[in-house]
Image: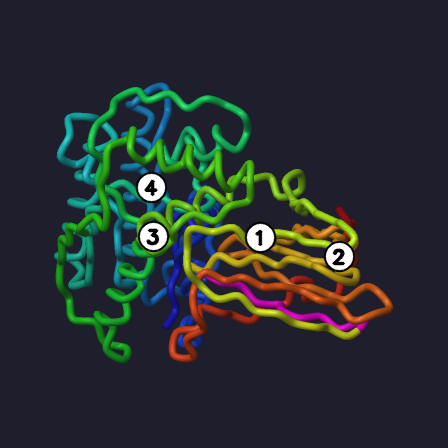
Amino acid sequence: MKIGITGQPGFIGTHLYNYLGLREDVQRIPFEDEFFLDEGKLKAFVRSCDAIVHLAAMNRHHDPRVIYETNIRLVQQLIDACVATNSTPHILFSSSTQEDRDNLYGKSKYEGRKLFETWAARNKAKFTGFIIPNVFGPFGHPYYNSFIATFCHQLTHNEQPKIETDGVVQLIYVGELVKKIADHIFKSHNGNAIDPVIEEIRLEHTSEGKVSSILKLLEGYKENYFEKGIIPDLTNTFERNLFNTFVCYIDHEQFFPFHLSKHTDDRGSFVELVKLHSGGQVSFSTTKPGITRGNHFHTRKAERFAVIKGQARIQLRRIGTDKILSFNLDGKTPSFVDMPVWYTHNITNTGNENLYTIFWISEHYNPDDPDTFYEPVSPDGSQCSSL
C-alpha cells in the first residue's frame, strides 16, 4: 500500500513515517514541504498515493490570521491537486480538540475538515477526519508542539519551567496516535478498493493530569535520573512514555558516558551499576575483540549498557537521521550509556581482551512482541568521531 504524509518532517509526521517503515506491506511515498510551492510535484505526489495523511499545518504564529489562512490554503492546495489529477486517495486529516474553542487555529481545523468532506462527497472518495487531543512524545519541538516538550527541554538544559495555567490536560502519546492512524488505514483498505465514506473520529485521550502533577514527575526524573542515574518506576504506561520522552531531550554528547563510583579496598572493588524503581531484565555478556553486538532499536523499551571490564565503543543514531554518536568506555572506569527509544545502537569490543557488559532493559524479553528492530547504526560503514 502506498501511503504519503504531508508534514512528514514534523513531530507527528516523523513518528508516523518511522512507524510505517516497520511494515513490509507499506511503500512510503516521500513528501517535502516544498511540494506545496511546486504544483507539478504536488500533483505527482497525490497521483502516487493510495492514502494521504494530511498533517501539514501551522500551529503557532504571532498573528492568528496567518495560522488560519495558511492551514486553509494547504488543505485547498491538496484538494486542487487531487481534482486536477482525478485522484481519489483515502485522505486522513489531523484535526484537533481546539475545534471546540473560539480561536482561529481551531477554526482553521474545523473548516479544513469540512472542505475535505465536501471534496470527498463530490468525488466519491473516502475521507477520515480525526479530532485529536493534546499529543506528546519524543522529538517534539519545545515552545511549539507541547508543554511537555517545553518542560523536558527546560529541565534538561538548566532552565526553570513556569506553569501558565494549571489545568487538567487530556493527552495521547504520539506512539499511540500513529498506531491508531495506521490501523485505521489498513482496516479501511480492502485490496485496491475503498468504499466511499466520510468519517469523523474523535480519538479518546489515553491519559490526563494536571500540569503541575506532570511537571512534578518530570522534576523527579531530573533529580533522580538526570543527576543520579536512577531509573524510575516504568510500570505505568503513561509514566513510561513520559520518561522515554524526557530522556530524548538530554544532550547525549554531554551527559554520557555516565561514570559510576568505584569503591576499592584490600578485598577488591565494588560498583553500583543500576539503581531503579522499575522491573525489567538484567543480562550479562562477554564479547570477543573486534565483535559488534546490537544494531537494533526499540520503540518503547528503555535500555542501559554498562561496561565493567575491557574497552568498548557504543554508537547510537536516531532513526531517520545521519548523525552518529560514538562513546568510548573502559571497564577501569565503570560507566554506562542509556539508549533512547527510536535510536539504533550497538556496542563493539575495541580492546584486546574479552569485553564484559551488563545490560538492563525495562521489559522481560517476549518473542511474540520483542520491540526490537534491526537497523545498522552505520549502514554505509562511515567513520564517526569519538566522544
Element under disc 1: strand
Q: Which residue is mark 1?
A: 338
User: Which is nearer the eye, 109 or 184?
Assistant: 184
The CA span between labels 2 and 1 is 30 Å
Judge left or right: residue 215 versus residue 98: right
Residue 350 x, y percent position in the rendering: 81, 64
What's the amino acid at mark 3? Ala
The CA span between labels 4 and 1 is 40 Å
Q: Residues within 10 Å of mark 4 (few under 14, many from 20)?
A: some
Residue pictured at 39% horizontal, 57% vertical:
16
Q: Which residues are magenta?
A: 289-299
Residue pictured at 19% horizontal, 62% vertical:
126
- Tell me whether circle 2 and circle 4 mark residues in contact (CB < 8 Å): no
- Tell me whether circle 2 and circle 3 mark residues in contact (CB < 8 Å): no
Q: Is tag 2's residue or tag 4's residue first in the polypeptide sequence?
A: 4
Q: Which mark is residue 81?
A: 3
Judge left or right: residue 234 versus residue 374: left
- Tell me whether circle 4 and circle 1 mark residues in contact (CB < 8 Å): no
Q: Residues within 10 Å of mark 1 (few under 14, many from 20)?
A: many
Residue 252 x, y percent position in the rendering: 62, 43
Q: Is tag 4's residue or tag 1's residue first in the polypeptide sequence?
A: 4
Judge left or right: residue 197 versus residue 317: left
The CA span between labels 2 and 3 is 75 Å
Report if residue 129 is visible in the image: yes
